[in-house]
């Protein structure tokens, strides 16, 4: 268990899975920059910046919910947690000043489209693991809402996703504790990276290659 003052941001899981160097630049070197994608993303998150609740039939909506998980050492804010009314008395959670049992269902807004990798799902699963610890309940699924496609994708928190999320949380802690930023390696994803200018992956990769080549030549001569 981690203490309250030793928690890492849930959002860093996504940075880590996108690129460990980007994660280190943001969370170790405190560098950040806006690009079109992050600005769009911020716009989507704005409406959940303040905590608020509302009711829609058998669903209660809580926006901007603070989360923490001492077991994994994570903290953050959920865009939206829906509470679905259920009939089973032994399941779900109780809500203050309202009767019945309710099943928590985290929903995260994302700009863009659904991705092939696990980044978004891991971040959502991280939120679910926080809610599970805070509410002492098992959460089976949640959803990602994509702004570009206006599509809501249901995500099942199965054993594999839970294990990938826990692995990412451990790796995040290891990376940040090392205090070392990994070297740049240019890939296609770099073109959409908000830290491209600070990172300069093509230039640094070239420099790394020439340092390597010089060393090889020197070793061959000796
Ligand atoms: S530009 Fe590429 S290597 Fe550099 S931080 Fe971004 S994704 Fe990582």
Image: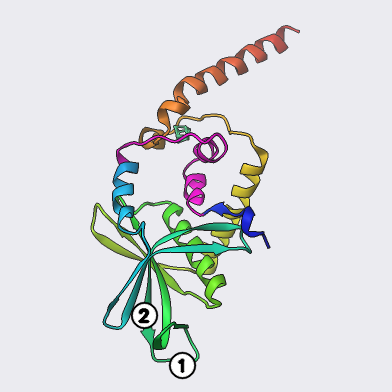
Q: Mark 2 points at which residue?
A: 84
Q: Where is residue 219 in the image (x, y as percent from the top left)?
A: 72, 12
User: Under tag 1, what secondary structure?
Assistant: loop
Quadrant in which residue 162 is drawn: bottom right
Dot 2 lies on which element? Answer: strand
Locate the N terminus and report the quarter of the image it occupies. Answer: bottom right
Classify residue 95 by image quadrant.
bottom left
Mark 2, Cα crowd under 10 Å, few <14 / some 14-19 / many 20+, is some
Q: Is residue 43 magenta?
A: no
Give the x, y percent position of residue 214.
63, 11
Q: Main secondary structure of the magenta part?
A: helix
Which segment is the magenta one?
10-37
At 61% from the left edge and 60% from the top edge, which residue is drawn? 72
| Mark 1 surroundings within 10 Å by alpha-carbon count, few (fewer than 14), some (14 through 19), many (20 or more) | few
Q: Which colour scheme is used?
A: rainbow
* Picture residue at 30% right of the left edge, 57% below the top: 47
Q: Which residue is drawn at 35% across and 42% down?
A: 38
Mark closest to the chain's N terminus, 1 or 2: 2
Does ligand 1 reach within 8 Å of label 1's beta carbon? no
Residue 154 location (% of width, % of height): 36, 67
- Horizontal side, residue 163 vs residue 195: left or right: right
Within the magenta stretch, is there residue 12? yes
State the CA–CA distance, disc 1 to disc 2. Answer: 13 Å
Q: Could you tell me if the residues under marks 1 and 2 are in contact, i.e. CB atoms within 8 Å?
A: no
């Amino acid at each position: 268990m981690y203490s309250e003052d030793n928690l890492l941001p849930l959002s860093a899981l996504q940075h880590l899975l996108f690129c460990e160097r980007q994660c280190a630049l943001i969370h170790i070197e405190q560098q950040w920059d806006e690009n079109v994608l992050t600005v769009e993303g911020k716009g989507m998150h704005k409406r959940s910046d303040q905590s608020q609740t509302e009711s829609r039939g058998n669903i209660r909506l809580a926006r901007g919910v603070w989360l923490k998980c001492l077991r994994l050492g994570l903290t953050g804010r959920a865009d939206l947690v829906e509470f679905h009314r259920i009939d089973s008395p032994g399941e779900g959670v109780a809500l203050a000043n309202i009767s019945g049992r309710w099943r928590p269902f985290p929903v995260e807004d994302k700009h863009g489209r659904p991705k092939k990798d696990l980044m978004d799902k891991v971040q959502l699963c991280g939120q679910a693991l926080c809610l599970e610890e805070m509410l002492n309940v098992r959460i089976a699924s949640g959803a990602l809402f994509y702004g570009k496609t206006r599509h809501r994708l249901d995500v099942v928190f199965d054993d594999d996703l839970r294990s990938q999320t826990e692995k990412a949380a451990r790796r995040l802690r290891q990376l940040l504790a090392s205090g070392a930023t990994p070297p740049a390696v240019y890939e296609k994803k770099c073109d959409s990276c908000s830290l491209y200018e600070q990172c300069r992956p093509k230039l640094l990769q070239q420099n790394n290659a020439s340092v390597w080549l010089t060393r090889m030549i020197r070793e061959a001569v000796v």
